[in-house]
Image (cartoon, rainbow, N blue to C red):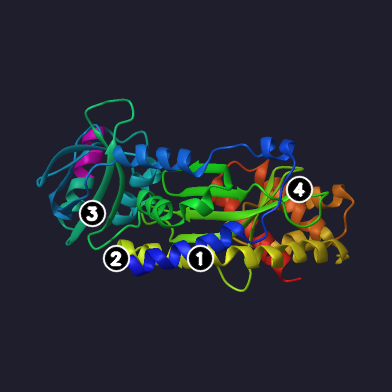
Amino acid sequence: MRVLALFAIGMIVHLHVAGTRVVPTMERIMLNDRTFEEVLADVERRAEQNLADRVVAVADIQMAPDGTLTAESTPLTYALNSHGTRQLATLLGVRWSAWFNPSISGPERADEVNRRLSRTPGKLKLRATRDPDGGPRAILRALLSASFTPLDDVRVFRAMATLIGPFLSDFRFVRVDITETTSHYSAVHIDPRGDARDGLHPGWHLRNSEVGASALSLDDFWWRLVCANGLTLELDKRLLYRTHRPADDGLLSAMLVVAMSKLRDRWDQGAKLFLRAREDRVPHPDAAVESVLDSPEVPRRLVEEAQRAALASGDPTRFGVVQAITLVAHTTNTDPDVRFAMERRAGQYLAAA
């Protein structure tokens, strides 16, 4: 571990010093959002609300008429959130809203759920958090495989703080989104890169899920100060992609250090791509948008909105297509996971230049 720490410190000193330049005071003020230390404090506060995981036999889980769950091996009473409800429906093999429509009473629903649970073999890991309103019930975040080993946000952020804290002091978080299933953290460097008219700030985007909805990933991220649009850019391959499986603190720290050490060189590549994209004309921007966003992750209405934005912009270049997509991802859309999908696909299109 000592060798790893020395390696990390040497790498960070290089990252922190190389390419440093003075930026105007006004620009620093405009980017004066939350620091790494402030976001770390928020992550730690959320982690303190989480309860210890419980592994229980599925057949021991019981639903009460009021919709809460209990298990013989834990004294807790769990209230389901929407993600937990979807997972329970999948476990039971039903469509919850159709199977338990409003005409089904609480006792009838409980009888049906309990009958199915009692016949289901195996064990589950229950992940829960305290009721934010201070109630006596725990909020069930997820029903997971008993072997699921999460890489929680707090472990990731503490590893970053321990080994690469000095490097992170020059970053500001422009977006933090926490949903029932995923967490998104977008941080950019205070120094811009590329064309001065864009105010392009490079950084990184960390996406994670403590309930098994996605892997831990770290991607190049660019923030355009002019319009506050973000873009996840994939150069060669992603900075970090790790499914949730056992990893000690040393391995987790090493992965993060190696990923962060690649940023500076990739920023130079990214800035060149943006300049090239401004010169790459696209015959039919609306058709390009549809091709880029051809994914079940992106609702059709957002595809059409991005097509209209591309045509209205009057910019028939690859950059204009990317700008239209990220504009809609940031303004019309409200789902962080959909935004991530749109920004990532736009970044792949830009990198194809």
Q: Mark 4 — residue?
A: 199
The kind of residue tagged 1 is Met
Q: Where is residue 336 in the image (x, y as percent from the top left)?
A: 55, 46
Q: Which mark is residue 125?
A: 3
Q: Does the magenta stretch include residue 11?
A: no
Q: Find the distance from the CA under tag 4 to the CA under tag 1.
A: 27 Å
Q: Find the distance from the CA under tag 4 to the CA under tag 3.
A: 46 Å
Q: In this view, does 286 lie to the left or right of 178?
A: right
Task: Please identify, in this view, whether the residue under mark 4 or under mark 1 is nearer the observer.
Answer: 1
- Mark 4 vs 1, N-terminal side: 1
The kind of residue tagged 2 is Pro
For the residue pair 258 and 349, the one nearer the viewer reads as 258
Neighbourhood count class around disc 3 (C-alpha, 10 Å): few under 14, some 14–19, many 20 upward: some
- Mark 4 vs 3, N-terminal side: 3
SS class, disc 3 = strand
Q: Can residue 59 be seen here?
A: yes
Q: In this view, does 265 lie to the left or right of 7?
A: right
